[in-house]
Image (cartoon, rainbow, N blue to C red):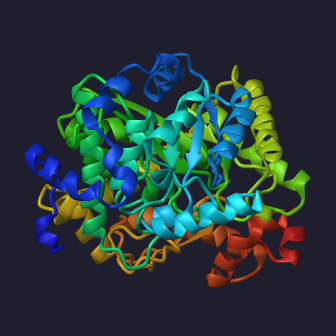
Amino acid sequence: MNIVEIFNKKLDKKALMQEREQVLQGWPTGKNVDLKEAMVYQGNIPESKRFSSALARADENHKTLLQPRAGVALLSEQITLLQHLQNSCDLLPTTIDAYTRLNRYEEAQVGIDKSREAGISLLNGFPAVNKGVKACRELVESVNKPIEVRHGTPDARLLTEITMAAGFTSNEGGGISYNIPYSKRVPLEKSIRDWQYCDRIVGLYAEEGIIINREPFGPLTGTLVPPFISHCVAITEGLLALEQGVKCVTLGYGQAGNLNQDIAAIHSLRELGHQYFQAAGFDDYKLSTVFHQWMGGFPTNEAQAYSVIALGATAAGLAGATKVIVKTPHEAAGVPTKEANKQGLEATRQIINMVSDQKMVVGSALSQEIELIKAEVHAVMTKVFELGQGDIARGAVLAFKSGVIDIPFAPADANSGILMPVRDNNGAVRILEAGATPIPDDVLALHKEKLDERAKVEGRDVSFQMVIDDVNAISHGKLVGRPKEANLRAL
């Protein structure tokens, strides 16, 4: 696809319907998707099981909802898993397997068959496309909470058709956030266009009064991502979704670890989302936020893992995030058991309950961090719109091509990979190398000042070694990756 072919324009309905005929032929289960019948089915889902309604109530009542990750190969096991978790959370997921994420449905089927023979899940998620509408509806009807499809798919068109027809009331992902952190050679303009299709389908449901939530994936690579980078991606994907008729958007952010910065990130994300959405002419939408607990390496020790979970829960609660995505004490070991998943939820619930009546005082440090993030986002987004000559879709592709947006540690060829983050002396994520991101000089000077402060405490130069130390720090029981002797000096 040539870059000039991607624009932020609502897809023509007639052309969309022609494209659907091809999409639904991608796997035999696609022939069972009847859009009119699906809209009737979706319209009959009770409000108690509708994602958008739960998010709206949470924001109105200033509550933070809990949602785990969960997905296994077999329908009966997925039902058992979600039923085990539903009384400990507010919202349910279905995490999709890696083969389905890559549209490799034949291999997913082999995984299903082998899982059935072995009696255990040999896939790292639920193969919804292979299962089809009927089986997915059985899953949706087996639980009493709203359910979202969570995956990592650059081309989620068939997955979206099947899961939305089956009664899932939220769809996570986007053309940037489910490409750059996950794929190497998928052209960005193609994944954005494929997700315009997904959003247009959700928009068709909205035209019938059926509001399905859309959630760009906030954490990206989950590794030292500066808030301004994830915010720019989230806002861009939100704008792309709204253009296609989406009416309910949840913008996300992945925990960085510094409490002040994490709270500032959620505060600024909501404010910036409204600012950019309204500036683009949108007013008929609902905006909520999601805070993802730590997405990096976890300690193998369960007691230490619970501490990481508790810190994330505290940040989400104090920040007033609409929901929090909960991790488990088995993160370092691989796919968690249903018991460990529930324990992570229960630990998070305890923290959320304890901080629910507390308000984070907006002092000078928090205000400064909020303003810093906003200044960085405005600088980048201004350049994105300039590159696209006002078109956010074209601007996003050109921004990645030029390095204006640059996601740390992402595998995609479309990503420059020059921007280098590192923690400051308090554990906040700062910029070591800005690359081509258009961060103002005075902001870069502040980042340098913060990093020089850390270097002085640790008795070493600011360098890439700090980055390496920081990437591994939490799994080793720390936030800032300091040399052993520097820890003593810092104390």
Q: Nearer the viewer, residue 114 or 446?
A: 114
Q: Quarter of the image holding residue 174? A: bottom left
**Residue at the location (32% across, 70% down)?**
404
**Residue at the location (91% across, 51% down)?**
303
**Residue at the location (78% across, 42% down)?**
344
Q: Is residue 333 left or right of residue 181?
A: right
* Residue 6: x %, y % from top left: 16, 63
* Residue 208: x %, y % from top left: 24, 24
Q: Is residue 194 left or right of residue 265?
A: left
* Residue 82: x %, y % from top left: 67, 37
Q: Is residue 96 above or below residue 342?
A: below
Residue 200 appears in view: yes
What is the quadrant of the C terminus in the image? bottom right
Q: Nearer the viewer, residue 349 or 374?
A: 349
* Residue 139: x %, y % from top left: 57, 36
What is the quadrant of the N terminus in the image? bottom left
Residue 232 appears in view: no
Q: Is residue 75 left or right of residue 350?
A: left
Q: Is residue 477 above or below residue 161?
A: below
Q: Nearer the viewer, residue 275 or 177?
A: 177
Q: Is residue 458 above or below residue 324?
A: below
Q: Is residue 119 above or below residue 355?
A: below
Mark count: 0
**Residue at the location (28% across, 32% down)?**
205
Q: Nearer the viewer, residue 362 or 29?
A: 29
